[in-house]
Image: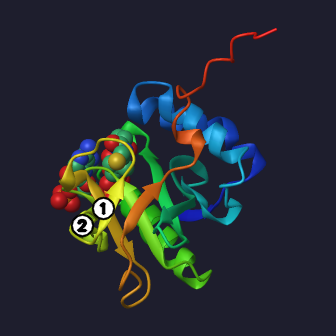
Amino acid sequence: MLTIGAERKEDIPSIREINLQAFGQEDEALLVERLRNSPSFIPQLSLVAYENGRAVGHAMFTHLKIDAGSGSIPALGLAPVAVLPAYQNQGMGRALIERGINDSREMGHEIVIVVGHPEYYPRFGFKPARAAGLECLFPVPDEAFMVLELTVDALDGISGTVVYPPEFHPCDFSPPKADQS
Ligand SMILES: CC(C)(COP(=O)(O)OP(=O)(O)OC[C@H]1O[C@@H](n2cnc3c(N)ncnc32)[C@H](O)[C@@H]1OP(=O)(O)O)[C@@H](O)C(=O)NCCC(=O)NCCS
C-alpha cells in the first residue's frame, strides 16, 4: 500500500539513500541536506512515499524567489524528486508530485518552478517558463525550465528571473579578499 507523508526525523537516512540510488551520485542527496538546513526548507513539503511502510520515494518543494525588477515574488522550487530504481514507473513520482502540488496550493503558494525532464512534468500542468516570461540565472534548456501556476493567472503581469537559493550553487564562492595590510 502506498502512502505519502511529510518527512520524519527517522526518514532522513532513507531519503539520502533514495536520492543516492535514484541519481547514481551524491549531488542530490547533498542538496537535500543543504536545503533541509536552510531558510528555504518547508518541512510539510519534504514528502516521502512509503510502500508498505518502507520509504521508497522523496520529493522536495522549497522556497525560492522570482526577481521581478520592481520587487521579488515568492515561489516554490520542486527539486529533487527521486524514487528508488526498483519502485520507478509505478506511480510513486506522480503520487508525490500531486500531493506536493495540492498541499502547496492549500498552504497558499501560487507558483512552482521545476528544472527537469520535459517529458515528465507537463503531465502535472507545468509549462515552459521562458515562454511565460521567466528567466533562469543558470543556463538551462528552454524545454527543461518549467513553471506551474497554482492559482488562476498567478503569473499574469509577472516577468523576471528565478533566483534559486545559494544551497543550489555549492561551488559558487568568492575567494577571500587578499590581505591588504
Ligand atoms: C523521474 C522519477 C522521479 C519519476 O518517478 P516514477 O515513480 O518512476 O514515475 P511515475 O510512475 O509517476 O511515472 C512514470 C512515467 O515517468 C516517466 N519517466 C520516468 N523516468 C523518467 C525520466 N528520467 N525522464 C522522463 N520521463 C521519465 C516514465 O517514462 C513514465 O512515463 P509514462 O507514464 O508516459 O509511461 C523517477 O523515475 C526517478 O527517480 N528517476 C531518477 C531520478 C530523476 O531523474 N529525478 C527527476 C529529476 S528532474
Taking the view exactly as shown, the residue that stands out farthest to the front is 181
Q: Which mark is residue 122?
A: 2
User: In front here: 116 or 67?
Assistant: 67
- Mark 2 neighbour class, 10 Å CA radius: few under 14, some 14 to 19, many 20 or more: some
> Which residue is at 50% across, 73% downward?
70
Determine the CA span between mark 1 and mark 2.
8 Å
- For the C terminus, which image quadrant? top right
Check contact, mark 1 vs mark 2: CB within 8 A: yes
Q: Quadrant of residue 6?
A: bottom right
Percent of width and height locating residue 104: 55, 75
Q: Which mark is residue 146?
A: 1
Residue 29 drawn above or below residue 138: above
- Mark 1 neighbour class, 10 Å CA radius: few under 14, some 14 to 19, many 20 or more: many
> Which residue is at 35% across, 85% downward?
156
Q: Secondary structure at mark 2?
A: helix
Residue 165 drawn above or below residue 175: below
Residue type of the residue flagged with mark 1: Met
Q: Is residue 3 visible?
A: yes
Residue type of the residue flagged with mark 2: Pro
Q: Secondary structure at mark 1?
A: strand
Left or right side of 68 for 144? left
